[in-house]
């Protein structure tokens, strides 16, 4: 038997071995699912700094590219062709992009945190007034049922007096300034917590681990930005070595399209939410809404969630304003509707454009699906992830129709269609 005659038997043997090995792996995973899940959770915890660094590099990549393009344009053509000079410019662009990101974060926190602190302090100080308002509502509601009113109001008055005494004696005197607040937390809150809650040490360790992971993530992001072209080339080598050229071209094109969708949506949505938060802060101060800084932060953060975000943020903010002034709550609702109309019809399309290419139904579907599966993160990332899946499926359908010589436009399949053969 020559070598060519042995080839079919070798292929059949390798196929049988692969099927048996895959069956054994599937059997092991099904009957040891908890151990496998624990292994992946442990692996994810170990590689968390890598994932965080990849996210930071992903967010910094557009800024890095613009800075590098500017530095390259300012460099002579002779130096631009030198690899060592370009590597130095790439490093300078990475450092400048990180410095710009840190500066923007610091500027945002420096503007927001003091005002949010004042809003929280004002909210705590207004709790006794809110209690009186709620008490009036309860008395009005139960005025036709004196027996129920007596029992409910006695319980309410007892709880309200205890809460008011605690606020006036323990909380409010320690929230007069930042220094007294930090002193109170350090001398009173933390010793009591360490005495009562045994897990405070675990919280401290977790915080230190998070700081360590962030530092490693920043270093990882620098490496990823510095070697992004090499990593991309190595990935393409692997793809072209495993698949046919036409299939590899399709995979590379889909990856580029996925990056375009994800990058355009996330960066655009962050910028859009920042602008909406600033506009909300300015307008809330103009209209003299209470807790303007706190409301603006809530509106800006929840605006990252498509479709449902404005309503998720507006409901608690409206309740806060309603406790102070019900009429202002009505004005706030009208303002939020106008702001979201401006965002949805003018600002959002200008910034995001058609970055996802999804219809409104699929946006709603993706938010509900991924939000139900993964919570807040799923609601934020569900739309771009589903847009990538939708794009891949659409291209596969178009490829199948094109290979069969059938029309690719959806309009050709609407209504009663005749035989396609």
Image (tube, rainbow, N blue to C red):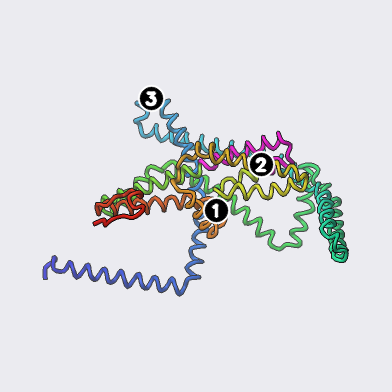
Horizontal side, residue 322 vs residue 369: left or right: right
Q: Nearer the viewer, residue 133 or 252?
A: 133
Horizontal side, residue 255 vs residue 212: left or right: left
Measuring 55% from the left and 53% from the top, which residue is drawn there? 377
Q: Which residue is mark 1?
A: 377
Measuring 48% from the left and 52% from the top, which residue is drawn there? 361
Q: Quadrant of the N terminus?
A: bottom left
Q: Position of residue 131 (x, y in %)?
A: 82, 53
Measuring 42% from the left and 46% from the top, which residue is drawn there? 259
Q: Which residue is mark 2?
A: 334
Q: Which residue is mark 3?
A: 76
Measuring 42% from the left and 73% from the top, which residue is drawn there? 28
Label 3 to label 2, Cα distance in Å? 56 Å
Q: Nearer the viewer, residue 380 or 242?
A: 380
Label 1 to label 3, Cα distance in Å? 45 Å
Q: Which mark is nearer the camera, 1 or 3?
A: 1
Q: Earlier in the sequence, mark 3 or mark 2?
A: 3
Q: Which residues are magenta?
A: 268-295
Q: Nearer the viewer, residue 246 or 110?
A: 246
Q: Earlier in the sequence, mark 2 or mark 1?
A: 2
Crowding at label 2, few (<14), some or many (≥20) Cα neighbours within 10 Å? few
């Amino acid at each position: 038997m020559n070598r060519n005659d042995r080839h079919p038997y070798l292929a059949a043997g390798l196929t049988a071995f692969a099927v048996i090995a895959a069956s054994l792996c599937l059997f092991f995973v099904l009957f040891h699912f908890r151990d496998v899940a624990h292994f992946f959770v442990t692996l994810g915890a170990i590689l968390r700094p890598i994932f965080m660094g990849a996210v930071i590099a992903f967010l910094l990549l557009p800024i890095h590219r613009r800075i590098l393009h500017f530095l390259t344009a300012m460099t002579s053509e002779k130096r631009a062709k030198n690899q060592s000079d370009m590597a130095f410019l790439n490093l300078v662009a990475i450092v400048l992009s990180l410095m710009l990101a840190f500066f923007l974060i610091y500027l945002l926190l420096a503007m927001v945190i003091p005002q949010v602190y004042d809003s929280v302090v004002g909210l705590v100080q207004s709790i006794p007034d809110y209690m009186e308002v709620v008490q009036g509502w309860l008395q009005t509601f139960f005025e036709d049922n004196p027996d129920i009113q007596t029992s409910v109001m006695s319980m309410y008055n007892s709880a309200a007096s205890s809460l008011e005494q605690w606020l006036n004696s323990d909380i409010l005197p320690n929230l007069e300034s930042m220094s007294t607040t930090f002193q109170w937390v350090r001398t009173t809150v933390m010793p009591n917590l360490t005495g009562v809650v045994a897990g405070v040490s675990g919280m401290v360790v977790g915080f230190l681990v998070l700081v360590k992971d962030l530092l490693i993530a920043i270093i990882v992001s620098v490496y990823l930005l510095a070697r992004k072209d090499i990593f991309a080339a190595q990935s393409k080598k692997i793809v072209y070595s495993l698949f046919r050229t036409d299939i590899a071209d399709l995979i590379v094109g889909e990856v580029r399209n996925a990056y375009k969708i994800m990058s355009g949506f996330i960066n655009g949505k962050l910028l859009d939410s920042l602008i909406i938060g600033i506009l909300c802060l300015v307008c809330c101060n103009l209209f003299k809404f209470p807790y303007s800084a706190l409301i603006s932060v809530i509106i800006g953060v929840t605006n990252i969630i498509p479709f449902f975000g404005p309503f998720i943020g507006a409901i608690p903010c409206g309740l806060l304003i309603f406790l102070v002034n019900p009429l202002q709550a009505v004005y706030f609702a009208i303002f939020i509707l106008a702001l979201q109309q401006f965002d949805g019809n003018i600002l959002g399309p200008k910034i995001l454009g058609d970055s996802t290419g999804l219809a409104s139904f699929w946006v709603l579907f993706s938010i509900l699906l991924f939000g139900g599966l993964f919570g807040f993160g799923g609601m934020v990332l569900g739309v771009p992830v589903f847009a990538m899946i939708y794009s891949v499926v659409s291209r596969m359908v178009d490829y199948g129709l094109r290979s069969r010589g059938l029309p690719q436009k959806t309009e050709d399949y609407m209504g009663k269609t005749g035989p396609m053969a």
